[in-house]
Image: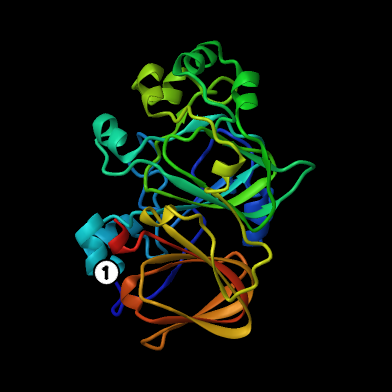
Amino acid sequence: MTEPLEPIRLPANQPPQFYRGGDAIARLRGVSGSDSKFGPEDWVGSVTTMFGQETTGLTRLPSGVWLRDEVRAHAAAWLGEQHVAKLGDSTGLLVKLLDAGQRLPVHFHPSDEFARRHFDSHFGKTEAWIVVGTYGDDPRVYPGFRETQSKATVAEWTREQDSPSMIGALNSIPVQAGDAVYIPAGLPHAIGEGVFVVELQQPTDFSLTLEWRDFLASPEKGHLGIGFDTAIETLDTSGWDAERLGTIVKHTSGDRAESVNLLADGSGKFFRADRIQLTGGAFALDPSFAILVVLEGEGTLRTERGGEFPLAKGDTYAVPFAAGQAEVSGTVTAIRCRPPAPEER
């Protein structure tokens, strides 16, 4: 580890996935979309492995060391003592760039309590999507059932692999850059073709996939070995009308403040995300572990010890707590992703 600890520019980290996509990530990163390493997901600053894997999904630092191992070895420097007291030596966060080149299957994620019982994990998988780009004729997302469903009905859809009924039962919402959708654990959902997001989630890979046929190799991949009857116990089958959806969907494209809180109320106990958008000025960042994703422009990230790091479209940085008070300057737009504030957990 370099002393004092400073921000680290991260390489792309794209483990293999079962669905198409990746061109939007390649464009953001400024490389050819035909480069085969660019799949539909880029796991940024990841200390999380894919389900059942030993190292696939982890971020390897330019030094060749796994970020997970660096954080574990120097947890207080990376995360801050208050974070470590609440969440231990995990960052408590997984950030992804996700480019849906096709509609994703209908799926959901376990709560913390369910994950403890069935996956021996401190974390479930609550997540949020920040839409940073769209393409195609009709980009949209599908959060929550429109009307309350019985678990027996959902179980029948799953047995029959009745995709039209599954997707038809969900809310269908058109989206544009600047929209954000908070997805509590248990909420059934899908992301439509042509939606490019920065995704924040708890640091696990627990996806319970109801619509597995034509997506996954087997039903076991859908229920992660616990059986669909058990998996559905953690599924939110309640109806989400427009008023209720308004509590998880946020529209921020028109907000031109230098710093914009992107996520809906209630998400703060899982993660935080702010859009920093500057036109020649500077913005101060308090000490925190963070993943910085640069969307547009050019600028500089400075730390209190005098470190200077160039920012350009497509750059991703892991910023340790020990970097201290920092500052972003320039004409630049970036998303700063952070774990929950210690007092929120």
Residue at the far front in the pictured view: 243
Q: Position of residue 124 (x, y in %)?
A: 35, 41
Q: Position of residue 22 (x, y in %)?
A: 63, 47
Q: Position of residue 275 (x, y in %)?
A: 56, 67
| Disc 1: which residue | 80
Q: Nearer the viewer, residue 141 or 297?
A: 141
Q: Secondary structure at mark 1?
A: loop
Q: Nearer the viewer, residue 135 or 45?
A: 135
Residue at 58 percent across and 76 percent down: it is 258
Left or right, 228 with respect to 242, comes to left
Q: Within 10 Å of the Cα at label 1, are there few (<14), some (14-19), or many (20+) other Cα atoms?
A: some
Residue at 80 percent across and 42 percent down: it is 137
Q: Position of residue 341 (x, y in %)?
A: 34, 63
Which amino acid, by three-letter code, is at mark 1?
Answer: Gly
Vertical placement of 37 versus 257: above or below? above
Residue at the far left in the pictured view: 85
Left or right, 211 with respect to 110, comes to right
Residue at 41 percent across and 39 percent down: it is 185
Residue at 26 percent across and 71 percent down: it is 77
Residue at the far bottom in the pictured view: 306
